[in-house]
Amino acid sequence: MARGRLSAAALAYIVGVSVAAVAAALIFWRSEGPAASSAVFAVLVGLGMLAHAYPVQGFRHQAYQVTLPFIVVAGAILNAWQLVAFIVLIHVAEQARLRRRLHIQWFNVCNYFVSAAVAAAFYHRATALLPDGALGQVAAALAAGCAFVTLNRVLLAGVLWLGRGLSPLASGLFQPELLAADLITVWIAGPMLVLTLEAGPWMILATAGPLLLARLALSAMLARREAQVQPVEARAA
């Protein structure tokens, strides 16, 4: 997808995901709750932009961010237009630094918003079913994070298959090690959300510290994986 022209199938797929993003925004808007405070929104956006602008270079020239906990918290406490702004702004920060092709970045924005909207729906449904209190909120955040990862990876796998000819297996998106790293970052979202609701927006910053360790671990894991793959590809060539 990054080279040459898009195939008709890949273009149709991107259009379909774009339509889904617009539909998700409209549905989210119709069921809109109260807006989060300006302080919460500003801290979430600032940290989200920082995390998203500095991805870890991964397998098959892909990039992996540790933005996931901020997305889960955003889906839980932001209203529809705040969530739209959050998703757009974190990708603006990434684009300003990395200069991706516009059709790639547009797909990323739509993919992330659809996935975040579904994650938000999972969170709010889970909180309605689970007991009130911190334990229920942590469990709901875990459900939301897992929903985001699953849908985001499935949508990305589809466009890589149609646009670059990479099967889901060849794309590396579903490596067990990578999914384990995702689970670790999802786990951070629960305490981040609960402490933010209880003590205010600066707890987002206080609970974001483990993401630095997660980023280092992810970098090391992906570097080892790339080092293992390159000799195999060289021999095959």
Image (spheres, rainbow, N blue to C red):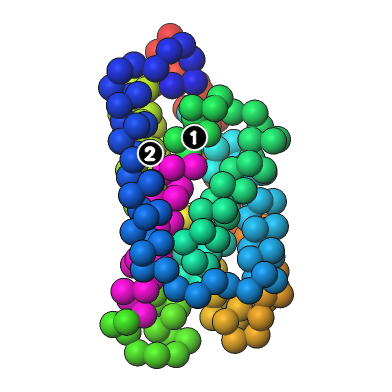
Q: On the rendered structure, is 34 left or right of 96?
A: left
- Name the residue at 41% across, 61% down: 29
Residue 186 seen in render: no
- Name the residue at 48% across, 15% down: 3
- Name the residue at 52% across, 67% down: 78
Is the residue 87 above or below the residue 94 in the image? Answer: below
- Residue 18 shows which numbered tag? 2
Given contact means CB atoms under 8 Å apart, are the residues at marks 2 and 1 in contact? yes
Is the residue 136 above or below the residue 80 in the image? Answer: below
- Residue 208 shows which numbered tag? none
- Name the residue at 35% across, 24% down: 11
Is residue 117 covered in magenta? yes
Quadrant of the drawing holding the C terminus? top left
What amino acid does circle 1 point to?
Answer: Trp
State the residue position of label 1.
106
Is residue 218 covered in magenta? no
Q: CA distance from mark 2 to mark 1?
A: 8 Å
Q: Residue 162: x, y in percent?
A: 31, 24
Q: Residue 62: x, y in percent?
A: 51, 33
